Image (spheres, rainbow, N blue to C red):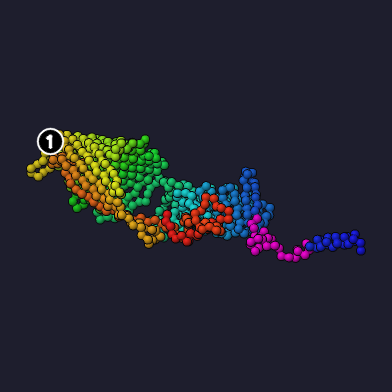
Amino acid sequence: MTSRIRLIITLAVISHLILLTPLVISQLPPPKEAGTGVSAEEADKQKPLSSRITTSTAVPSDEVVIRAREQEKTGDIYKLRGDVEVTYRRYTVRAENVTYNSDTGDLEAEGGVTFDGGPRDEHLTATHGHYNVNSETGIFYDVIGIIGAVYRGRNAVLTTTNPFLLTGRRVDKIGARYIVYHGTITSCAMPHPRWTFDAAKIDVVAGAEAKLYRSDFRLFGLPIFFFPFMTHSVDNLGRQSGFLLPLIGESNTKGLVLGDSYYWAVNRSTDLTAGAEYFSKRGWSQTGEFRTRPSENSSLEMHYFGVLDRGDPATGQKEGGEDVRLNGEWVHGGWRGVTSLDYLSSFLFRLSWAPTFTQAIDSEVHSNAFLSNNFNGYSFGVLAARYQNFQSVNNGDEINILHLPSVGFSTVDRAVPSTPLTWGFDSSAEGVSRTEPDFETNTLVGRFDLSPRIALPFHFFGWGFRPEIAVRDTYYTQQLQPSATGTIGNPVDSALNRRDFEVSLDLRPPPLMRVFDHEVLGRQIKHVLEPHITYNRIAGLDNFQNVIRFDARDILSDTNEVEFGLINRFYGKRTVPKGEAGCQPQLSVSKPGMLPGKIPAEPLPGTAIAVPKCEDQGPTTR
């Protein structure tokens, strides 16, 4: 056989083998998809099919995206089965079975229906429902939903400051509006909320308010109060004008109590609450609260409480009155102004109508307003204050002390150039007055005070010393003439100059400390003892009995005292467990023919660097 015939026969056999190969391998099972153990053909069948449909009523750029394991199309009708997902604009509907009409935009969903999306992050779950993607309206049944949260797996991430949850047998969605029939609304976590409003009908506008018809308020499932109609704010700000919950009660001193209040949200930074209560045995009371924050650095609050009393049924004595409080703050350009004003018409009114025992027995009334500025270690302030102390329930039996005006200027300790010394001073110029039964000063008594000081702080082997010397001079335009009969005495128009000399020594020994070897709750404990000793000496005051008492500045007297104390401090530092990142093991270097030693700046060729594991190093601390 010639070589040419052999070549032809060989090529013919090879060509027949190539043609027969598909027939052989076609009988084998399909190849499995890598890492799944499922054939590629079966995997393709399990993957949801995706289609994009342009709706006839939408703008060309809007598309309805549908995904499902099985899709069947008959004209404009799509029958979708298995992990169905329909997305259009801002909303997504998921269910097991969906029938979708691409012409009208209607879809019918059944089996594990979920509805998500919208500007308020709306999430609803239902058994079945109907929805139109074009008009964004629909009806869902057996609904549990939350507005203002995004679900990530089983966890919900709140996206608003005031999310709320709702349930209902039927929920109609009309744009951003939800109408819930025979359902509940709450802001507590489901499925066991602490409080709910159960209503026959709830009209909710996402981001605005909810109107409840024939509802009852339930606390831990127990009905508390019935409301024929009410509104509940579901706005992010949570502030809506309207009447608050009415008050109904019975008291052995007030009788039947009926009351209510109205809340007015004037704007984003201002609100007002006004209310009244009727007492069948005594009269009626009025309450008011005004709050405003005009700017980031200013605020104002005002509280009013008053009672128009017909009189105590037993004695006939009228115990009405008013209590007004005003608090405000203002900060601008380094200046800070604060006001805290309190007006009480009578102590008898507070004893009779204060809501708590602590308030009832408080016989003092403080009103203060000041303006201050701190700059370069200096402090300047202006103060106006009124102090009132009721001695009894009788009118006029009270002590009144007035500071108007009061100007102060002071500084922190400042270094004397080229010396270890420090200096400072306190000064003030005030107009004060005091009135009480059988005692009254001038309308304005001048009081001028100046106190310079100098100190020498230094440290020696851990010991701290701070000796200080100061003098004080206080000038009064009126003084007290003591009485020999034991009474307060009488103020006289005669100037008084009070001087004194002050010395103090502050001694701080080195602190004692110990770090314990045993850990407590995963922390290493350190105990520190800090002793301190202070000596004070004031001398030169020989006219103490002639000083009129206005405040703590006027009770200064000769003093010779030693104060000592011991401060205990305990510190806990969390330790790093073995093997945790952060430990720094020692490195060793070994090379054939050389002993372990320090690591060179550049490892030599053939050098092996051994890095021990963190477990070998023991615990370290942060």
Which of the 4 image quarters holds residue 196?
bottom left
Residue 59 against residue 182 in the figure, above or below: above
Split into 4 quadrants, where in the image is the C terminus? bottom left
Residue 13 against residue 485 in the figure, above or below: below
Amino acid type of disc 1? Val
- Which residue is the site of mark 1? 492
- Asked whether, in this view, residue 85 is left or right of residue 396, the answer is right
- Asked whether, in this view, residue 513 is left or right of residue 158, the answer is left
Magenta-highlighted residues: 22-49
Tell me where residue 21 appears, x and y as whole percent.
79, 62
Please indicate, yes or no, whether residue 580 appears anywhere in the rendered image: yes
Frontmost residue, 203 versus 293: 293
Name the residue located 21 percent from the left edge and 47 percent from the top edge: 535
Name the residue located 27 percent from the left edge and 55 percent from the top edge: 251
Name the residue located 46 percent from the left edge and 51 percent from the top edge: 163
**Secondary structure beneath disc 1?**
strand
Split into 4 quadrants, where in the image is the N terminus? bottom right
